Image (spheres, rainbow, N blue to C red):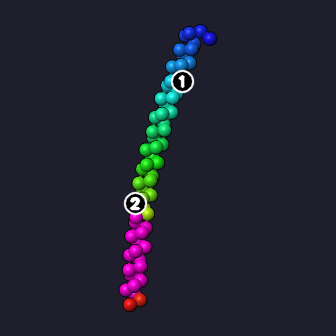
């Protein structure tokens, strides 16, 4: 393989690695967003559960 060919391969692989790094970052950001949304949903579900329990108490009283 000539030096020029090696440089072309190296540049191509470097661009591929950079692209993959950007893809990893996008996926990590999306995963973090989904974790935040899950936390919000779990908090809302807990609040709804607590509210339902309070209403049941008043109905049983």
- Looking at the image, which residue is at 38% across and 90% down? 61
Q: Residue at x 55, y 10 (%)?
A: 4
The magenta segment: 43-59
The quadrant in which residue 59 appears is bottom left
Q: Element at badge 2? A: helix
Magenta region, mostly helix, strand or loop? helix
- Please give the label number shown on residue 40: 2
In magenta segment, residue 52? yes
Work out whether 20 lies above or below 48.
above
Q: Residue at x 59, y 9 (%)?
A: 2
User: Tag on residue 51?
Assistant: none
Give the position of the N terminus as an image quadrant: top right
Q: How crowded is mark 2: few (under 14 residues within 10 Å), some or many (20 or more)?
A: few
Q: Local crowd at mark 1 within 10 Å, few (<14), some, or many (≥20)?
A: few
**Above or below, comparing residue 10 to residue 19 in the picture:** above
Badge 2 vs badge 1, beta-carbon distance below 8 Å: no
Identity of the residue drawn at 56% across and 9% down: 3
Q: Name the residue under label 1.
A: 13
Q: Position of residue 23 (x, y in %)?
A: 48, 37
x, y percentage for residue 6?
57, 14
* Element carrying mark 1: helix
């Amino acid at each position: 393989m000539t030096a020029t060919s090696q440089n072309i391969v190296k540049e191509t692989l470097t661009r591929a690695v950079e692209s993959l790094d950007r893809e990893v970052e996008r996926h990590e950001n999306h995963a973090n967003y989904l974790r935040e949304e899950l936390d919000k949903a779990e908090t809302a579900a807990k609040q709804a559960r607590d509210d339902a329990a309070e209403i049941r108490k008043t109905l049983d009283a």
